[in-house]
Image (spheres, coloured by chain):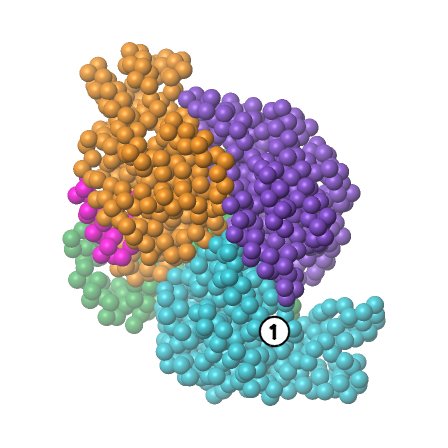
Chain colours: A purple, B cyan, C green, D orange
Amino acid sequence: MKRFDSDYLEGCLPEILQRLGETNLEQSVGYGEDAHCAAAREKIRAAVGRPDADVHFLVGGTQTNVTVISSLLKPYQGVVCAESGHINVHETGAVEHSGHKVMALPATAGKITAAQVEKAFASHRDDANHEHMVQPGMVYISFPTEMGTLYSKAELTALSAVCRRWQRPLFVDGARLGYGLASPLCDLTLPELAALVDVFYIGGTKQGALFGEAVVFCNPALAHEFRYHIKQNGGMLAKGRLLGIQFETLFTDGLYLKAARHAIDEAFRLRDGLRAKGYRFLCDSPTNQQFPILEDAQIEALRAEFGFEFWQRIDATRSAVRFCTSWATRPEAVDALLAAL
Amino acid sequence: MKRFDSDYLEGCLPEILQRLGETNLEQSVGYGEDAHCAAAREKIRAAVGRPDADVHFLVGGTQTNVTVISSLLKPYQGVVCAESGHINVHETGAVEHSGHKVMALPATAGKITAAQVEKAFASHRDDANHEHMVQPGMVYISFPTEMGTLYSKAELTALSAVCRRWQRPLFVDGARLGYGLASPLCDLTLPELAALVDVFYIGGTKQGALFGEAVVFCNPALAHEFRYHIKQNGGMLAKGRLLGIQFETLFTDGLYLKAARHAIDEAFRLRDGLRAKGYRFLCDSPTNQQFPILEDAQIEALRAEFGFEFWQRIDATRSAVRFCTSWATRPEAVDALLAAL
Amino acid sequence: MKRFDSDYLEGCLPEILQRLGETNLEQSVGYGEDAHCAAAREKIRAAVGRPDADVHFLVGGTQTNVTVISSLLKPYQGVVCAESGHINVHETGAVEHSGHKVMALPATAGKITAAQVEKAFASHRDDANHEHMVQPGMVYISFPTEMGTLYSKAELTALSAVCRRWQRPLFVDGARLGYGLASPLCDLTLPELAALVDVFYIGGTKQGALFGEAVVFCNPALAHEFRYHIKQNGGMLAKGRLLGIQFETLFTDGLYLKAARHAIDEAFRLRDGLRAKGYRFLCDSPTNQQFPILEDAQIEALRAEFGFEFWQRIDATRSAVRFCTSWATRPEAVDALLAAL
Amino acid sequence: MKRFDSDYLEGCLPEILQRLGETNLEQSVGYGEDAHCAAAREKIRAAVGRPDADVHFLVGGTQTNVTVISSLLKPYQGVVCAESGHINVHETGAVEHSGHKVMALPATAGKITAAQVEKAFASHRDDANHEHMVQPGMVYISFPTEMGTLYSKAELTALSAVCRRWQRPLFVDGARLGYGLASPLCDLTLPELAALVDVFYIGGTKQGALFGEAVVFCNPALAHEFRYHIKQNGGMLAKGRLLGIQFETLFTDGLYLKAARHAIDEAFRLRDGLRAKGYRFLCDSPTNQQFPILEDAQIEALRAEFGFEFWQRIDATRSAVRFCTSWATRPEAVDALLAAL
């Protein structure tokens, strides 16, 4: 069985495993206050180009989203996002569980626009009954999106401008951030992205770590007493050093982007191969997730040998599926998949 | 100034005021355990035709909605409703504040269909990742809806059947229940409605009481320890007798429906008068809310003498507005409004 | 049956009932934005001696407590109070339901001291693991307390100083505020009290209104967007004018304190009569609640004719009970009670 | 520096690291549905002696506590525990954040008694105002406690009997379960403990895993849809296999208890050595945490070479400190500590 179900099928990058072994018997204090976390924070600040950024490490994506969002909102505020946003669809209502409405806007290929957000802010303020309605308190986007697409520099700049004019934080879910930045079709660098947003996270789980997400508050004032939020939300790992060691390793010698680039290379080989065979795609994804449209019978047959995700029905006989590559994807597996299609 | 802004512009029906005066110096225990509440419960059970119904009194609509909904849902469940539903739009996210997602479905004239609800339930169960998604745990509808429309007996029967097949409670927000039941276009009686739903409330605030909503659990098993929920949600009125006295009065000699019928009569006079003058309406409302489409200039001019609510823009020069009648609407006010249009 | 169970046994002061009748057919906008609410706010600001105070009206005590407290705290903060505080004991965990720990301190006669609060603040800051503990975010006291006792000016000044030094709001539950201020043993005026606290409320429910609590933010910065909080917590009364009319009446011609003084007079008559008969008391209460210690057999016998609350067992044969007087207590009832004891 | 600050200072048992390496490039589905998790569940069921137990893996203790507790309680219920319980003191109010009161009882050496719990349940039911109070909905204890102490079989049997009579779940926080079971002074086996409680967890983080807690529902009916709770609370690890692999390893060849026994041996060497030198202890701990009482000057001096936790002041010149041993404690470190004292 060759699996393309997701980008968290394997353990971790060998460099990380090696460092875990080397450091295993070190004694260190807990909860992220050890030397490895400190070193990882420094490396991330450097990579992000923001020496004053406040960096925190959490274990997983849902936990990170709900902790950041609920730390930024007042009780009567909600978070604006794309209808297809992970927080709206795939987190069992964790944001609502924390008391806040997810204010979903129709998305195009997973993205929302500055104009939509402007309208959401303005129409709330203009409503005579505004106190009877949830106040839009921040904006959440994913980079890349659930559809593998990317905001361009122009699009993100426009979103950022709206958020700043309304003094609402802009938060980027970067669970797959590396797969975005490593794409040749991405016109943003990490420092450029960081300069446009208030807080974002650098995904580890899907990018070669065992687990872990590094939250970067570009606007450190927003991180006030954030460690209380982490602890209260059950996200403060006792052996915090594990997060430190992993991000330290990922941000040494450019490993983070190097690993991501491998995934992109394989995704593009898959995409180009399928295109050459005449397949069409649900959308044009510049990252590690590809959504070709297949015949249902073909999908059924493929399942014997390959793992992948059903995405959505297209018509009576065809559906889109999702193939994910990752840092760990073996080229032979892509070859086999191409051969099978 | 003659006001048609809402159906809670005045104090209360004179019969209620009189009873409050008569009982003012009685001493009674608090929190809804007095003789007036007991008598009101009996009268409501009789009117509803369910001798085993569990009846509770709360002060206002948002409080009632959130108390009932959060008492019925498990933490990971959400409430299915129309996109235009009051809980989704006009309660400052009170349901989400209680931890639950509002799962809004596109509505037609304020209503959702049995087929939509069936699909919401079925697609959740069928999703391989269902534990990553909010589970639809109940259905909320309004009767009449925010648009003044009514579910027919057939429509409500179909919704009821879906909910029972899936063993999910069906809850009816009856803030304007009387204005629905009193409409000549309503094909449901109160006992018929009660037989189809699990829990609903009989609105007092908009129907001639000073305040108060009577929650009726047709399925009394769902009311288990409901008084704890009321108290925890800040809805247990110390002088509960005030709720008892008001509902006792409303359900004596058919006052509740009599008062509602007056509102309907005046609303229909207004509707028919406007129709005769050639006005069109945003939708065909069989109840006390009417939504004619007016020229913007006309709207501006009307405001000098009349109170009403802007509803939504129709095109560059015209908008729909809302006129509410109530138990207290003076026929002369309707005459004046008709004359002014 | 003559009842002394509580101070909310009857309806309301006749002046209020009369005003409700006089204004009944006025049309007014909802949700506290009518002229009566505006007038009541002005009268309260004047009585409190703070022209810039922000005044809001809610329906009941639990609702008021949870709305104010949850509006002031960050998610990881708790509210410091007496172990016997109403929020800790008699509100079905409404504060915890809003996500916040009630940090209860041992109380003496219902009161906590500045030294206790200072210690709570200081020990949190000094703890190396402070992020693993709830941060004390504000202080809640009752005036009078659950035991009918009062903070002296010196005690409240000391509490206020601690709160200000630590920049934590001091909130006073004034459900029975009038019964405190009207006591001859109270050494604080309303303006003096207001100058020492950040937010407090003026109880209506127990002081002659049908219902209603007037929240006064002496520090108006703390009231930022408070109406959203009220609405989200289900406390925004549709016919807000009812609250306006009641507080307008209570704060006209000194009615509020006049009505309270009657209760105190009768409570003191009862107290002095019992003292003369040799009864002892659980504590020395200067307000409308009196806690004499009776023989259990005597308690049983009294129940045939009088309503009152069992408070706590003293020894094998005696218990303390509570008698409440109010604005509505008839002198004959007190006479009868004294005769029966 | 030799550290005894806690039992999570190092990475993990070498056996675990080796298995992580061996399995690193396996592809497996996420979220705990892989073969390693399945195997670990089987091994745990066997060790626990309950073939029908429902076993779930979470990442950390606070997360586990809040997920289990909030899944078992109704909104108006609280959890009864010792005042010194971890959920009451060191989890930043995570339980209250989930909406539930922590109902703390005075503890003796970290333990509460069946009689205390019986009284808490009975006095709630007997209170006339019970709906105004939080209902005690379950009991939480730690085994070992925060003080390193253990419930005896008799004590746990009595607690269990009270909980069953009242039909309230009994939940055991087993963050250090192995250190309890491995103590020669423990008179309970794992199956005996499991037979007395409804749900408990087997701590990994403090017992030689990188992280992870295995929740065991001895009463599987209580685990209904528990995976939704895990996901909503941010505790569903994407690479769930990491939890499976670790617990599989811990429950192979008795590694879990073997590693714990090493900690106990070293703790007892430390305890006996200190006793021989005449030191007294805060309490008599039969597990891996020891609380000797030292002179303050001595404490200061020790800090140069040793890590440990200040616990509490005893008198003007002496304080109790905590030394933790673990699976990783080197005998030489204990020797050095004994020599230094």
- Can residue A193 be seen here? The reply is yes
Q: Is mark 1 on a helix, strand or loop?
A: loop
Amino acid, disc 1: Lys
Residue B114: image location, x then y, percent: 55, 74
Task: Specify the quadrant of the image occupied by residue A209.
Answer: top right
Q: Which of D280 and C322 is in front in this view?
A: D280
The span picked out in magenta is D152-172
Instruction: From this view, report whether residue B59 is shown above or below residue A89.
Output: below
Name the chain under label 1.
Answer: B
Instruction: Please indicate whether residue A323 sits to the left or right of residue D122 in the image.
Output: right
| Majority secondary structure of magenta residues | helix
Q: Which of A257 and A130 is in front in this view?
A: A257
- Can residue D198 be seen here? The reply is no
Give the residue at mark 1.
Answer: B111
Instruction: Please indicate whether residue D270 sits to the left or right of residue A108 in the image.
Output: left
Instruction: From this view, report whether residue D190 is shown above or below residue C233.
Output: above
Residue at image coords 73%, 51%? A113
Task: Specify the quadrant of the image occupied by residue A173.
Answer: top right
Q: Quadrant of the N terminus of chain D?
A: top left
